[in-house]
Image: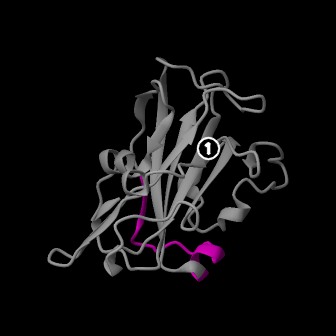
């Protein structure tokens, strides 16, 4: 995420939805959120206290959830039971706890008034309770996007900054060796805004 002015204390949420090749119309997705403090001079977020990664599966519509509290994403609605599931304690995607400057960098350029922030997540290719297995060398269609909340209160209420959110064009990704995505870099290549 870069090219705009992000205020300290903002929650920067990036998301990715990976098409499930075995179940057309469904995805495995996750969001990765970082509490931004680049203007204060912090070069990275602390993954233990300032980063959260959550996984969702099924029919995902992240771009439509701008006005929905993230804790209500995948909440069952009459007539749509079972179309989307949240994974909490057994989330497939997780925060990378080491090397914060590499995985959760952030910056502020006072001259250009531009911020940048990146959020990385990892996943094992296969587990006992995974929704879908990620296969090395297989091309997956991945949609990405971002939402910026101005502060913790807005983040908890699901109030996205109206000028700071967007969805990118689907891209094709192939996973190799380590299944990790740096969403900041993904969003950078997939989105153009401002």
Q: Is residue 181 left or right of residue 123?
A: left
**Image point 34% across, 81% down: which residue?**
40
Neighbor class of circle 1 (other Cα within 10 Å; few <14, some 14-19, many 20+) is many
Q: Which x, y percent locates residue 9?
A: 47, 79
Vertical arrangement, residue 186 with respect to residue 176, above or below:
below
Residue 78 figure quarter? bottom right
**Image point 61% across, 72% down: which residue?**
158
**Would you name the residue on which mark 1 appears?**
93
**Quadrant of the snapshot with the N terminus:** bottom left
Front in this rendered view, residue 66 or 5:
5
Q: Is residue 65 left or right of residue 160?
A: right
Q: Which x, y percent locates residue 167?
A: 43, 52
**Image point 83% across, 49% down: which residue?**
79
Front in this rendered view, residue 30 or 168:
30
Q: Residue furthest front?
A: 98
**Image point 39% across, 64% down: which residue?**
44
Number of marks: 1
Q: Which x, y percent locates residue 145?
A: 45, 52
Is residue 8 in the magenta section?
no
Vertical arrangement, residue 35 with respect to residue 15, above or below:
below
Q: Which residues are magenta?
A: 153-167
Q: Residue furthest left?
A: 111
Q: Which x, y percent locates residue 141?
A: 48, 30
Q: Find numbered disc 1 in the image and state the secondary structure of the residue it sits on.
A: strand
Q: Is residue 110 left or right of residue 169?
A: left
Is residue 158 in the magenta section?
yes
């Amino acid at each position: 995420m870069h090219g705009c002015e992000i205020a300290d204390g903002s929650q920067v949420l990036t998301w990715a939805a990976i098409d499930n090749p075995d179940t057309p119309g469904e995805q495995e997705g996750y969001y990765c959120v970082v509490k931004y403090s680049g203007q204060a001079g912090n070069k990275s977020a602390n993954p233990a206290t300032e980063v959260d990664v959550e996984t969702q599966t099924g029919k995902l519509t992240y771009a439509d959830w701008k006005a929905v509290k993230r804790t209500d994403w995948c909440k069952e609605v009459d007539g749509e039971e079972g179309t989307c599931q949240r994974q909490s304690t057994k989330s497939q995607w997780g925060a990378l706890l080491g090397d914060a400057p590499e995985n959760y960098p952030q910056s502020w350029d006072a001259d250009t008034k531009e911020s940048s922030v990146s959020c990385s997540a990892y996943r094992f290719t296969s587990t006992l309770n995974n929704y879908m297995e990620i296969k090395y060398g297989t091309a997956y269609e991945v949609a990405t996007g971002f939402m910026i909340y101005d502060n913790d209160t807005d983040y908890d209420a699901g109030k996205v900054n109206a000028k700071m959110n967007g969805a990118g064009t689907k891209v094709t990704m192939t996973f190799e060796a380590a299944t990790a995505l740096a969403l900041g870099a993904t969003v950078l290549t997939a989105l153009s805004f401002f």
